[in-house]
Amino acid sequence: MVESTSNKSVKKTKVVASHPKTMDMIVEAIQALKDRKGTSVQAIKSYILTHHSTVSPAHITSSLRRAIKSGIESGLLVRPKDSNANGVNGRLRIGKLPEKPKKKA
């Protein structure tokens, strides 16, 4: 006899990424590359693809674009003064990093 699967409840498991958030990877790349004029988006992209093998090369461009846009709006990422690029092109530097809470003694 064949049992019906409609009576059983199916739980969907949430897929958890095996790599950090895109913004965390961008900050890591900028800190590691240490470019004095700011780090280019191409350099950030190649750093992420070489150091985080689980990131999909097909989706990294759109993920970078969204993360850079929100990072600039929040002040986490800034453009150097000599960079007149708008949008996601050009060089980037780290702005204000969020402060870690201090431990009370």
Image: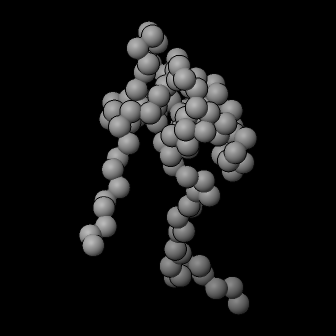
Res 55 visible: yes
Asked if residue 1 lies left or right of residue 7, the reply is right
Q: How many marks?
A: 0
Q: Is residue 80 left or right of residue 14?
A: left
Outermost residue toward the front?
A: 105
Residue 96 in the image, given as x and y percentages of width and height:
35, 37
- Which image quadrant for residue 45? top right
Question: How far from the left and from the top, in percent, is residue 33?
Answer: 62, 33
Q: Is residue 58 visible?
A: no
Residue 95 rendering spot, x and y as whole percentages:
38, 33
Q: Position of residue 66 (x, y in %)?
A: 46, 33
Query: Residue at 58% of width from left, 56% of height from top?
Result: 17
Q: Residue at x 62, y 58 (%)?
A: 18
Q: Quadrant of the N terminus?
A: bottom right
Place residue 105 in its image quadrant. Answer: bottom left
Relative to residue 46, is residue 25 drawn left or right? Answer: left
Name the residue rendered at 40%, 14% in the picture: 81
Identified at 70% across, 45% down, the residue is: 51
- State whether residue 101 is above or below residue 55: below
* Residue at the farthest bottom position: 1
Colour pattern: one colour
Question: Relative to residue 51, is residue 77 depicted above or below?
Answer: above
Towards the viewer: 40 or 82: 82
